[in-house]
Amino acid sequence: MLARIVGFAKTSLLDWDGMVATTVYLQGCNLRCPFCHNPDLVSTTAEVDEVPWEMVEDYLRDNCDFLDGVVITGGEPTLNEDLPELIKKIRALGLKVKLDTNGTDPDVLEDLIRSKLLDFVAMDLKAPLDHQYSQMVGTEVDLEAIKRSIHLLMTSGIDHEFRTTVVPHYLSPADIERMAAFIGGAKKYALQQFKNDRTLDKRLSQVSPYSEGEMLGMAETARKYVRKVILRGI
């Protein structure tokens, strides 16, 4: 039995920088970030339409001449025990695979990397690595697991990025600098503009995003620590 696919974006130029990709969405997440932009995929019991693997497979096979790869996102994909099987089926079609993850399960991440099943990993870095992290994600988090995932990516040789959704009132410019310093020397850090139109906590619809100037300032500070910093969504 394959991981349950509950969303399928046929073509995206935004989910994997420089690549033409198909994005598949898996249901269920172990975090409860109030700013989550896929709130329908957080709970495993939410009623969402399932996409048969056969439909995805037919599309990938018919379009593999112009597609570069597939992005697997969620939810949190590493919660699915059948994730390796899904990746193997995608790779059997000659396509690369990018995984989006929150980094809470370094064991799964390590197994996937050692098995050479991944071409790119994007790991969300939610907050500074202290008590603020659990507050940010709405549940208790094992910080050592997050730190292990960070170290794993930075030492694995696999192409990767860290990324942070910059939410006003939750994250300050000083927080962003602390996070950039923690991943000092990392290949790439993406700062993502907060969008208030679709969030797990509806109250965030009243929160205005940081201005473009403020985002540019945070990116400039982060560049003191990380080799490449990019902004998304501004």
Image (tube, helix red, strand yellow):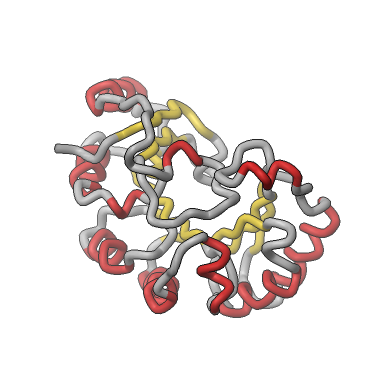
Where does the N terminus fall, quadrant-wise?
top left
Q: Position of residue 137 (x, y in %)?
A: 52, 61
Query: Which residue occupies the extreme right position in the image?
Result: 213
Residue visible at 33% across and 42% down in the picture: 44
- Is residue 161 in view? no
Give residue 70's position: percent from left, percent from top: 38, 39
Q: Give above or below for 197 relative to 174.
A: above
**Most extreme residue toward the front, as rendered?**
203
The residue at 32%/65% (across/down) is 105
Residue placed farthest to the left in the image? 1
Horizontal placement of 80 versus 39: left or right? left
Query: Is residue 207 shown left or right of residue 41?
Result: right
Q: Residue at x 40, y 29 (%)?
A: 8
User: Is residue 118 visible in this depiction of the protein?
Assistant: yes
Q: Is residue 215 left or right of residue 74?
A: right
Vertical arrangement, residue 201 with respect to residue 214, above or below:
above
Image coordinates for residue 100, horizontal then vertical, percent: 43, 51
Displayed quadrant of residue 9? top left
Report the number of numbered marks: 0
Compared with 10, 190 (above or below) is below
Q: Residue at x 21, y 60 (%)?
A: 115
Picture quadrant of residue 169: bottom right
Q: Nearer the viewer, residue 75 or 47?
A: 47
Query: Which image quarter: residue 180?
Result: bottom right
Q: Is residue 90 above or below residue 8?
A: below
Quadrant of the frame with the C terminus: top right
In this image, 173 relative to 145: left or right? right
